[in-house]
Every structure is written in structure tokens, then in C-alpha cells.
Image (cartoon, rainbow, N blue to C red):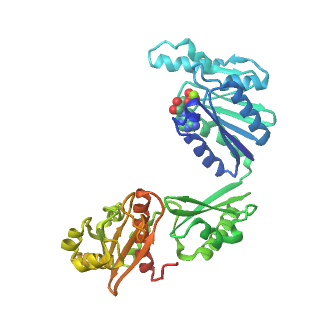
Amino acid sequence: MKAFILSIGDELVLGQTVDTNSAWISQQLASVGCDIVAHKTVGDDQQLIEAAIREGSTLADAVVISGGVGPTEDDLTRQAIGTLLGEPLELNAEWLAEMQRFFTRLARPMPKSNEIQAMIPRGATMLFNTCGTASGVRATVGGAQVFAMPGVPKEMKAMFARDVFPWLKERSGGAVILQKTLHTFGAGESTIGERLGSLMMRQRNPRVGTTVSQGIVSVRVNARYESLDRATAEMNTTVGLCRAALEDRIFGEDGETLPQVVAQLLVSGGVATSVATAESCTGGMLAKVLTDIPGSSRYFKQGWITYSNEAKASQLGVRKETLEQNGAVSEPVVKEMALGARERAAADFALSISGIAGPDGGTEAKPVGTVCIGFAHSNGVTAGTFIFPGDREMVRDRAAKMALMMLRYHLLDKPMPV
Ligand code: AMP
Ligand code: MG
């Protein structure tokens, strides 16, 4: 089963409203193994709507439309379907009575313009709207089944659940598309791709692909099979192969975040371990993400934001000579910051960050994006220097994430891969 998803509305093509309907519909269709051949968005223009429906009907078995079934001049989906069918619009008595009841309940007369919402092309089927006044339309165009629903997400979802999903599910014959996402941080998308190798071949099922968001490279696995049992088994095999290829570069799955995973490691094994932070360029971001998690008092002790050299010295005990000889963005300084924070907070671990987030302040030796991260633990202190690409926001975000990765690898008792 193939589906083509069409969103209609000037506000969508102008970028004033984000098309959330298509994403939601796609997710619903995947659960019954429906292949989405394309998403298309057109404005409130009847000819463009007709062309899009025609295109969808040649590419797919079902064209799922949202938008353009309201009562105003710019709502033209009904007319477009009528033209494609070569049939006139007729007043649907059942929906007209339903709308009249709706207005009676509000103690208001029904405006004449609302009548259009009960107009259905001859030979098409009316789809019931349980949350609003716009009826939907189901019609056969070419070989495809066309469903036209309101654009208002709430109304669309109710109509989809009532009349569209059951039709598609019945024809799917039990097929499913399962999805799983594995998250990594630290290696670039190309490195992850190289390690996955032939797992990423396009014709493979389950299909393996990568996406990047906020420095997190995620591996997406989609398994399309005729039954849930088969899809589950094949998904497990492919996820196992991805895990073998990427090893502990994968920090989490699906909705898991890096701070959550680190928090779990800190409290796992019965004895909770504690952490403190000493931050300069990240201004508290690391402490923020570590305390975003409910129950963080079990592991988070204290955080410092020591932006100035004086604060680094007076609050954390960083020596004046260390600052003068190496500069604030240096491994010796972040080591002393981490040691000072660990000791003063009486924590098991301390992470420290000092860097040049930009846009100014870079030098040839230490360009914008240079960040030193220190890590103090019971066996001493380590530090690393990184150069993160991007603007100020990106540099700060990546620095906080990298600090979490250093702690994670230590808690896993594994070296950080280079
Ligand atoms: P319509 O059914 O075309 O009158 O759409 C009514 C309202 O629903 C629009 O003004 C938008 O705010 C919203 N809407 C329409 N299409 C979408 C869509 N694809 N995603 C999210 N919201 C939408
Ligand atoms: Mg509209």
C-alpha cells in the first residue's frame, strides 16, 4: 500500500503555519506498513490542488489530504475533487442537518456560507467530522482512493481515526513499519556512515539511515514487513548489527537523552555517585542539563560559573601562575578547576569547561570554538582540548555534551574513542 500526503493552504506554503499534519499522518500510516511516496504542499489554488491530486493518484493507492474544506472562498478542495471526477457538487442532506443541529446548540442561525461544507461531489462519500462543521470527502480518482479532511489538526485527527485509518488498515493485510533510533555523539555523520558500511545500502530491509540534530548523529532503522512478528525479529537483528558496528558510541535509543543516560549511570548499581561542575564559557549549561532530570539531587552536588579569572582563582583555587602561564582556556586551568570543584563540593566527580564560544576572542593558537574540558575523579584528573564548529550557541551546546560524554565513558570504564 502506497500513500501520497497532500497539505493545502496558503499559510503552509508561506511558512506561517508549520505543516504538522503530514508528519502525524505519516507516523500513523507507518504503523500499518503504508509506504509514503511523497509529501506535497500547495496553496489555496484550485488548479494546483487538482494537479497535485492527479499526481498523487498516479503514484499511490491513497491520497490523504488535509486543508481547504472550510466555508470560505479560499477553501477549494471539494471543487477540485469535483472537477477531477467530472461531477457537480451536491448538497449532502445528512451533513446539512448535522450542521444545523450544531448551530441550534449554539443558539445561532447557520450562515449561508456554511452550506458549502455539506457539498460533496456526486458519487463521492461524505466523511463525518466529530469536532467541527467541515465534512470530509472520500472519492475514487483514477485508481486511487482520495480522502479530503479539514486542516485543523484536532478535526483532521478525529476524522482520520474514524474513517481513513480503518480503510487503510483493512487493506494493509497486517503489514507494519517499525522504527527505532540509536543516538551517538562525538563522531561525525560520515564516520558513523563508514562504520555502518553496507548496512546503509538503500535497497536493504530493514533500512538504515542517519540524521543529525544538535550534534547528535542518530541512526534510524525502519523495518517494513508483512507481519509484526517478522518485523520485530528483523528489527532486532539489524539493531544488533548497528550496535556491533558502533559499539558504545551509541549512548541511547529513541526518546533517551544524553543527560538522562549519564544520570542513570551515576545512580545505577545501588551506590549513587555525585558530580559537581565548574563552568566558564557554558555559563551553567552543563549544570542545567544535569539538573533537568527529576531526582537529580541524588547525584548533583554543586555547580560554579567562574567566568572571570578572579572567580576561577577565588572560588576554585586555580593558581594565578597557571592562569598567567597558560591562559584561561587551557588544559592546566580546567584541570585545576575540576580538582577545586571536586574537593570543595566533596563530590565523586567534577567536570570543568573553559573555552572560546565566540564570535570574538579567538586567536591563531586558540581559534573560536576551542574548548578545554577537565574531569576530576578518585584517581586524579584528565583534560581534553576540542575545537567545535559553529556559532556561539553550537559551541556551548557541544561543549556541555562532550563533558557529559567524558563522564559517561568513565562510568562505563571505557576509553573515549578518537
Ligand atoms: P483549513 O481546513 O484549510 O481551513 O485549515 C484550518 C486551519 O488549520 C489553518 O488555518 C491552519 O491553522 C491549520 N492547518 C491547516 N493545515 C495544516 C497542516 N498541514 N498542519 C498544521 N495545521 C494546519
Ligand atoms: Mg485553509
Q: Residue furthest right?
A: 143
Q: Between residues 234 and 352, which one lies in front from this camera angle? A: 352
Question: Going by the image, does 368 lie left or right of 181?
Answer: left
Q: Residue at x 79, y 39 (%)?
A: 58
Ligand 1 quadrant?
Answer: top right
Q: Residue furthest left?
A: 314
| Callout count | 0
Question: Going by the image, does 152 lie left or right of 375?
Answer: right
Q: Quadrant of residue 162?
A: top right
Q: Residue furthest front?
A: 364
Rendering coords of residue 244 (x, y %): 62, 76
Question: Going by the image, does 36 lie left or right of 23?
Answer: right
Rendering coords of residue 396 (x, y %): 39, 62
Rendering coords of residue 123 (x, y %): 76, 24
Q: Quadrant of residue 318?
A: bottom left
User: Residue 155: in sight, yes or no?
Assistant: no
Q: Between residues 315 and 201, which one lies in front from this camera angle? A: 315
- Above or below residue 329? Residue 104 is above
- Above or below residue 337? Residue 178 is above
Q: Between residues 416 and 385, which one lies in front from this camera angle? A: 385
Rendering coords of residue 56 (x, y %): 74, 38
- Above or below residue 134? Residue 347 is below
